[in-house]
Image (spheres, rainbow, N blue to C red):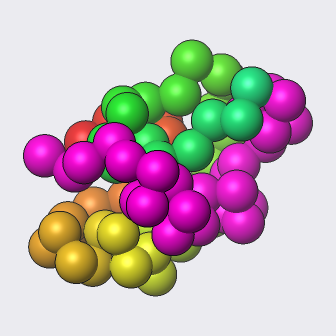
Amino acid sequence: MIEDSFENVQRCICDRCPSHNKCMKERTLTLFCARGKSSCDVRSHGCICNECTVAKENNLTGSYYCEKGL
């Protein structure tokens, strides 16, 4: 399980993802690999989860944590 910490939030790249939308921005939703899928309607426009240091350091494989959860 990924730690839901301030440090991980700071290193999170969710807000730069093409699928991170206005709803997520307004609600400041990030770190989906630790917090679970988004409560916003997610439309897949590309995924950068595999580029995230938090995901890499925790040996995560997969994508679209905002849509599917972990």
Quarter of the image containing the C terminus? top left
Could you tell me residue 24's position as x and y percent?
Answer: 72, 34
Which residue shows up at 70% across the image and 56% down it? 15
Q: Please tell me in which quadrant of the rendered image residue 35 appears.
A: top left
> Is residue 29 left or right of 70 when viewed as pictured?
right
Could you tell me residue 59's position as x and y percent?
Answer: 14, 73
Q: Is residue 9 visible?
A: yes
**Looking at the image, which residue sits at the far top?**
39
Which residue shows up at 39% across the image and 79% down it? 53
Q: Please tell me in which quadrant of the rendered image residue 23 appears.
A: top right
Say above or below: 17 vs 34. below
Could you tell me residue 29's position as x and y percent?
Answer: 63, 35
Which residue shows up at 27% across the image and 78% down it? 56
Q: Nearer the viewer, residue 37 or 53?
A: 53
Number of marks present in the image shown: 0
Say above or below: 35 vs 12. above
Q: Is residue 45 visible?
A: no
Q: Which residue range is magenta in the image?
A: 1-26
> Is residue 23 left or right of 57 when viewed as pictured?
right
Was residue 23 drawn as part of the magenta stretch in this picture?
yes
**Looking at the image, which residue sits at the far front?**
6
